[in-house]
Image (tube, coloured by chain):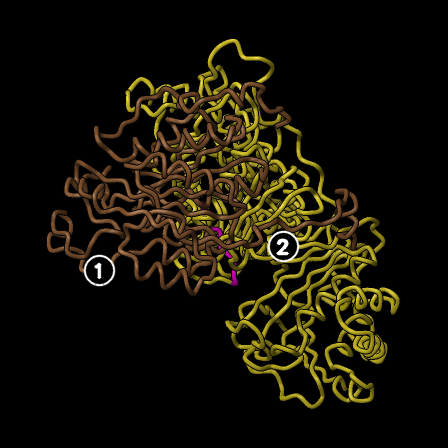
Amino acid sequence: MPCNRDPVAPEGMLAITGAGGHGALTTAQILLAALGRAGVHGLLTRAAGPQIRGGESAATLRFASRPVACMADRLDLLLGLDWANVERFVDELPVDADTLILQDVASVPPPPCLTGCGARVRALPLAARAAEIPGGRANMVALGALGGWLGLSHAALSAASERVLASKDAATRAAAIACLEAGLGLVEQGGCAPVGGAAGLWNLSGNEAAGLGALRAGVRFVAAYPITPATELLEWLAPRLPQRDGQLLQAEDELAAVNMVIGASFGGVAALTATSGPGLSLMVEGLGLAVASETPLVVVDVQRGGPSTGIPTKTEQSDLGLALYGLHGDAPHLVLAPLGIADCCFTLEWAVGLAEHLQTVAIVLSDQALGQSRAIVDPPPRAPQLPSRLVPDGPLDAPFQRYAPSVDGRSPMPAPGRSGCRYVAEGLEHDASGTPSSLAADHRQQLDKRARKLDGLDPGPDWAEIRGRGTRCLVTWGSSAGAVFEAAARLTAAGRPTRVIALRLIAPLARAALREALDGAAWIWVVELNQDGQLFAHLHAQRVLPPQARALARPGPLAWRPGEIVAAVLDAEETDD
Amino acid sequence: MTESQSPTTSTLRARDYKSGVTPVWCPGCGHHGVLAALTRALAHLELPRERLALISGIGCSSRLPAYVAAYGFHGVHGRALALAGGLKAARPELTVLVLGGDGDGFSIGGNHFLHACRRNQDLTYVVMDNEVYGMTKGQASPTTAPDWQQAKLTPHGTGMPRFLPTAIALAAGAGFIARGFSGDPAGLSRLLVEAIEYPGFALVHVLTPCPTFRPEHRDWKGRVHVDDTGPSTDPVAAARRIQADDGKTLGLLFRRALTPWRAEQAPACTLEEIESGLLA
């Protein structure tokens, strides 16, 4: 079996497709939960058609006995609950001659786009077995069959089923368990059945991880407007913020959301909003106000295909230019990007700490591939604790100056209620006291003050994840890091030592540290998921890339797969030779 | 935030609520009267200055927070209500006043106005309506008459009906709707006191003439008239009254008891308890 590449640590990838209501995604979620209970790592992505409900969907699940950070290049197994409109997902279903395709005995055969490669098709009595059980469903019989193929126990599958279907009535849950029992023996254990046993794993999506990072950082106020694919982050936080002395407010639009966050932060409370590209476009006005008035806040942009309404349900990393350069005026702020699903938690916690410490804006660039994917992961570590927001200390011996220049640019920010240091936060340029001013000297003083806060930041080691050595170097950011790490490991194993620099902090850029990390690299690729090569252009503008560096950039909506990166690197090297 | 009430609060006078910064407003601008009425109302209410936050957007009237001895936020154009809503939600014990003009509140900020009325947070919104954009030198605003032809951008008039702040606030669910006049600081001050004490969203629509770009509005002094029949409490009756009004009636037009907005509550949980829900 080609999937059984490593007999010690087997791994594999399966996909489930089906029309809405056939339960493709639910089936995959239960499988993922069962793998997690068995101590197996996994990654589950979903692809949906344009319908809000009832449309076709595809779920892809990769599993391994080590952390899984990206999808594999091929499918070991494809289950078609039906083949309606499956052509829409053909790009997401990389079948080959070694893929096992499962379907119901009564189903029409798969379309040629799936079988043209020579994949075997095997028919199972899914509907017939389900019909023998009152309330039985074919997808739950299929769940049992897949569980058997994965070598999962009945106990793990039924516990996972109970958890994922917790909101269903008792009869539905009992029927589900009877169905998965009926399906367990339909397919023999496959060669890529994973080895489990890891303890203490978590099951979460990138959006949930980001929400947890916000709670860990002490965020107590969120205002936001619903938008795909960020909404689940808000839905996860809505019931949990009140449990942490906080609250979530649904705003009338993104313009309101960002200003509500500014108001809460002015009130002394760590505050956050989450959105996607179209919403970030609207919020940019408010971000400029937050920078000018030195009011800390965090925006999570769960990116999707753009521009405009673009591709709301699929991924892309094409908002970097907006995040870096979208604010008018000279407006220094932070831009960060989580490097994986669990890292959404770490990066969010760190971003809130940085924003509070520096009294400025932090934009966190997650994306649909992180936010709406679910993974079995090791619990994310805590972010470094930074000094909190500077507040006036003790009695003041002179009139309070909110925007007084200082060595590191930071100045005390009292919250309303503190006597003796009332001030008016200003979006107009102002002097040290906050009084509006259009004098050149005041403008220069305040621009310098705000720039100094970021210029002087020592980000420590967390500005990037750096792995490997070698004269070949892949530079990347955000969600592409998972596929890039795996591509580098394959290149290294193939005798082409490759290092990776995955940027978590993009602005302010740790220029000296990045130059040092690039030292000695003869071949440099900047890998990212957008057409223009937005990070590549930014790194050139920042004068950190040597002239031989080249862009490896393509648009979404499909995330990078490691084989694609390996092929592009090898192809370019052969051309060079 | 644990600051106790200043022991000298009860001895504060209106002038103690002025910051000492000289207003940018033109001589004769109605906004001077609003500032006087507001500081008088604050002194009457004996509000501690550090527990008071004045939030504004952009425009001549939005400069007002700098002239009051309180916390303040001079934000961007049209978004003052949203910013104030976030502050009030995060710090419900503060007294939060929102100030601005007709362009800020009803044009660029129109959507936030509708939803602030609906949300019914305990905010006081003072709109200084001079029927013109003063800071950008004389363009038509949403409350400008359709046939006003003195603006270079709309030389034949806007041709659009006026935006009716009181009628729209009523339709959007506001529970406190009043109109004042900058030329009557004593009457306006009384309305402001009542608005600040009202436990919900209170709109105070203030007619404030712009002598620079709308010098003809000097005649407002003779056109305003006080209605002392007291506020309507029934929205249907209030709608009739407001629709039949000439826009120059002063007084409390509508007042109704409504439940103010309140954040979701839940029993406290530790981070560890929340994280345990993520175990595979």
The amino acid type of the residue labelled 1 equals: Met
Chain letter for yellow, please: A
Q: Residues within 10 Å of mark 1 (few under 14, many from 20)?
A: few
Q: Position of residue B153 (x, y in %)?
A: 15, 49
> Is residue B258 rendered to the left or right of residue A65?
left
* Residue A103 locus on image (x, y percent): 69, 82
Residue plotted at (63% across, 74% down)? A17
| Location of residue B109 with respect to A150 vertically, above or below | above
Q: Position of residue A39 (x, y in %)?
A: 82, 55
Residue A320 on the magenta span: yes
- Answer with the quarter of the image where residue B129 lies: top left
> What's the magenta region?
A313-321
Question: Does residue A509 appear anywhere in the picture?
Answer: no
Q: Is residue A110 visible?
A: yes
Residue annotated with mark 1: B160
Residue B27 vertical placement versus A231 (above, below): above
Q: Which mark is residue A331?
A: none
Q: Badges 1 and 2: C-beta atoms under 8 Å apart?
A: no
Label 1 sits on a secondary structure element that is: loop
Quickly name the residue at label 2: A70
